[in-house]
Image (spheres, grey):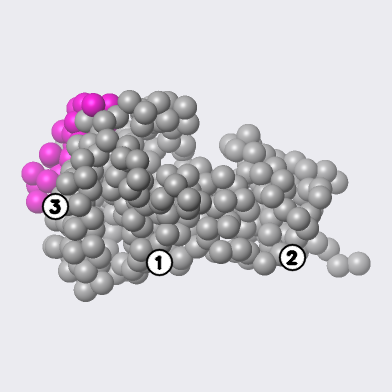
Amino acid sequence: MPQQAAILVTAPSRLHFGLLSFGNPGVRQFGGVGVMIDRPGLTLRIHAADRFETAGPLQDRLRDAALQWLESSDEVKELRCQVELTSAPRLHAGLGVGTQLALAVATGLNAFHHLATPAAEDLATRVGRGLRSAVGTYGFVAGGLIAERGKLPAETISPLLERVALPSHWRFVLVSPPGSVGLSGTTEQVAFEQLPPVPLAVTERLTCIMCDRILPAAKTANFSEFSNAVYNFGFLAGSCFESVQGSAYNGTALENLVKHIRGIGVRGVGQSSWGPTIYSICESESSAIALADNLRAEGWCNEDALLIASPDNQGARMSSTVAGL
């Protein structure tokens, strides 16, 4: 009798440049733009077992995602497999780990049970993702730069506006201070309830930057314009969170780090989601290495807090192997 194949799923990480809107009833909520990157990423493995088991880090999240998938399934009534997370970034650093993990579990379980993988919207719905941003959902499927306008009350997740592949030689230098975390869960929900609505004029300006500057610059590989537009978008979007963060960035240390990086000539700098990850856009591997060397030499971060990533234009990857080999 042939052995059940083990399913391997590798998902990229997500940088979110900022939201377009929140707090205004009757208009599209959230929306925004972001990009998928190849590192740090996460990897999980699913193989047959006598009963449902989880292994590795973040087991509670693995279990929740798997049970949500099972509850939404018409074809599968019982899980007899082990879901193991073999590598993952730390949570709540602005890298979209929760969405990538949940979608990886759903994709892997579909493959393990020989089921077709549904469209991105259905995949997210089955594991409770895409309630606000859909950048990570569409990015999981296709990679690249993702733009979405936000969702209306009747929509499950925001419709995709556009997906653009970024030049493969561009790089993102990430700084994620250890011990610092962004908002999540109940704390994040409370923050959104306390934040003032984004003025409609600001949403219009953000939409113009996204549609008229970021997307065209990405399509034409105009690095200078892309860098400046992403910074402008992130600063304006982040300023809408000033009553919670204290500024456009989550704390004085991150604000000063952004000023330093821009002060040495790097224009495309921003905070991913709630942070604490700060990203800098570089035109080549050599310029990324030079920036990383500067940040270490000037004492802004140590080796553990710094990473150089490439654009991920592929999205999640899946393969199968014979279990035990």
Quadrant of the rendering where the N terminus is positioned = bottom right
Q: Is residue 3 left or right of residue 6?
A: right
**Residue 267 badge:** 3
* Magenta residue check for 254: yes
Q: Is residue 185 above or below residue 234?
A: above
Asked if the residue under mark 1 is in contact with the one under mark 2, i.e. CB atoms within 8 Å, the reply is: no
Q: Which residue is mark 2?
A: 114
Residue 204: x and y, percent? 20, 52
Q: Residues under labels 2 and 1: Cα distance? A: 26 Å
Q: What kind of residue is marked 3?
A: Arg
Residue 81: x and y, percent? 77, 49
As drawn, the residue found furthest toward the front would be: 26
In the image, the segment drawn in magenta is 243-269
Asked if the residue under mark 3 is in contact with the one under mark 1, i.e. CB atoms within 8 Å, the reply is: no
Q: Is residue 50 left or right of residue 210?
A: right
For label 1, the SS is: loop
Q: What kind of residue is marked 2?
A: His
Viewer-nearest residue: 158 or 59: 158
Q: Is residue 189 above or below residue 158?
A: above
Q: Badge 3: few (under 14), some or many (20 or more) residues near its Cα, within 10 Å?
A: many
Residue 155: x and y, percent? 47, 53
Q: Earlier in the sequence, mark 3 or mark 2?
A: 2
Q: Which residue is mark 1?
A: 313
Viewer-nearest residue: 185 or 194: 194
Q: Is residue 176 left or right of residue 50?
A: left
Q: Earlier in the sequence, mark 2 or mark 1?
A: 2
Question: Which marked residue is nearer to the observer: mark 3 or mark 2?
Answer: 2
As drawn, the residue found furthest toward the right would be: 1
